Amino acid sequence: MITVQPMGQRYSIEIAEGEEKVNFGFIQLNYFLRNKVSTFSTSYDKGKIYLDVGLAVFYNLKFALKEVKGLSNLDGTDYKLVFEDGVDELTDLCVDELLALPFSDKLIYAARDLGAHIPDEITDPVTGKKIKGIEVISPEKLKDGLEKK
């Protein structure tokens, strides 16, 4: 039997950079938000469809990322995500800051596959092999700190 995944479930992706680990808390994107990502990242020219994967990653992060743990500001305080006023989506500047992290390549791999389903693992799109240093923590395994608010 096929299991229906309730929309809006939280899960996290933990990215290891050396000895440090950063935990990113995501929600599953509903159809409306997935369609928004597709609209913003797709163009058409002379009957051909072009997908800008970079824009898809940007908007996946903007709409799905809800919490982060393990990052700090220059002054040593905990880094906090910044959301648009009155909207549950990150500011463009906040997404830009995250995409400028030293391990942004791993974050990009993680964000490219955000969608309706919760991935079991993050894989390299060329080799299909699991990327070292990235762990998906499913809702069932999710503990302390990234609970649904």
Image: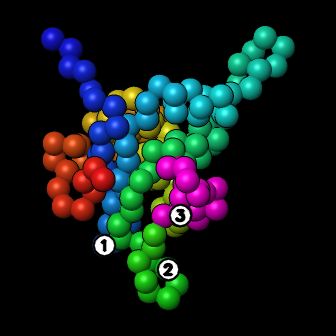
User: Mark 1 highlights which residue?
Assistant: 19
Location of residue 106 in the rendering, given as x and y in whole percent from the top left corner = 45, 53
Mark 3 surroundings within 10 Å by alpha-carbon count, few (fewer than 14), some (14 through 19), many (20 or more): some
Cα–Cα span, label 2 and label 1: 18 Å
Residue at 84% x, 14% y: name it. Answer: 46
Residue at 23% x, 43% y: name it. Answer: 138
Asked if residue 6 lies left or right of residue 87, the reply is left
Of helix, strand and loop, which one carries label 2?
loop
The numbered mark, 2 or 1, whose residue comes first in the sequence reads 1
Question: Which residue appears farthest toward the bottom when viewing the image?
Answer: 75
Question: Which segment did they paint magenta?
Answer: 81-97
Q: Give the number of the mark in front: 3 or 1.
A: 3
Asked if residue 84 lies left or right of residue 48, the reply is left
Q: Amino acid at mark 3?
A: Val
Question: Which residue appears farthest toward the front when viewing the image?
Answer: 86
User: Mark 2 highlights which residue?
Assistant: 73
User: Mark 3 highlights which residue?
Assistant: 82
Of helix, strand and loop, which one carries label 1?
loop
The numbered mark, 3 or 1, whose residue comes first in the sequence reads 1
Location of residue 34 in the rendering, given as x and y in whole percent from the top left corner = 51, 30
Look at the picture and state if 99 lies above or below 57.
Answer: below
Q: Are marks 2 and 3 in contact (CB under 8 Å)?
A: no
**Residue 95 drawn in magenta:** yes
Q: Amino acid at mark 1?
A: Glu
Residue 9 in sight in this render: yes
